[in-house]
Image (tube, helix red, strand yellow):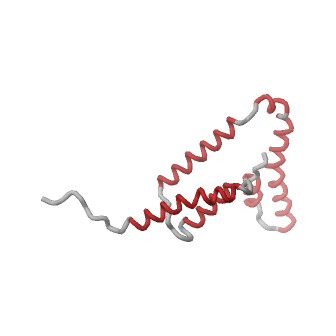
Amino acid sequence: MGTFIQEPKENVLLPSLLLLISGLILPILSFIFARFDSALIGEILAGAIFGPHLLNTVPIVEGLTVVGTVGLWLLVLEGGLSVNVEKLKNVWFISLLVALVGMVFPVILTWVSHLIFLFFFVFFGLFFSLLNKHI
C-alpha cells in the first residue's frame, strides 16, 4: 500500500510568498496613483511589474482570466447603474451625435489617409474608434 500524500514537484513557498508581496504592493501603488486621480494606472503598473514579462510572480491561468472577465462585467454594470435616465432624455440627440462622430470620424480619416498615402491604416482607425472613451 502506498501513501496518498505526494510530495510537491516544485517548491511552492517562493511563488506563494511573491504572490503575497505583489498582493500587498498593489494597493500601495493604487493609493499612490489615486492621489493623481489615476488609481488604475497604479494597478496596471503593478500588473506590468509582477506579470510574466518582468518578475513573473503572478501566473497567467484560466481562472485569473475568468476573474478579470467578471470584473469587467461588474465595471460595465456599475457604469450602467450610474446613468441618469432623466438627463439622458434631455441630451440624447447630442450624446448620439458625439458618439457617432467619435466612431465614424476616425474611420473616415483613416480612409482619406489611405487614399492619400497609399497605406493600409484601416485597422488603426478602427482601433482608435474603439478606444474612444469620451462617448
Residue 4 picture location, percent across and down: 21, 57
Q: Which of 81 and 113 is in front in this view?
A: 81
130 lies above or below 59: above
Give residue 90's quadrant in the image. top right
The residue under the point 32% across, 67% down is: 9
Q: Which residue lies furthest to the bottom in this view?
A: 54
* Quarter containing the N terminus: bottom left
The residue under the point 47% across, 54% down is: 62
Residue 63 picture location, percent across and down: 47, 52
Residue 87 in the figure: left or right of residue 54: right
132 lies above or below 114: above
Give residue 36's quadrant in the image. bottom right
The residue under the point 58% across, 59% down is: 26
Q: Nearer the viewer, residue 105 or 41?
A: 41
Residue 66 picture location, percent across and down: 51, 50
Residue 25 in the figure: left or right of residue 133: left
* Quarter containing the C terminus: top right
Give residue 99's quadrant in the image. top right
Q: Residue furthest left?
A: 1
**What count of labels does the image hold?**
0
Residue 60 picture location, percent across and down: 50, 60
Q: Nearer the viewer, residue 85 or 13?
A: 13
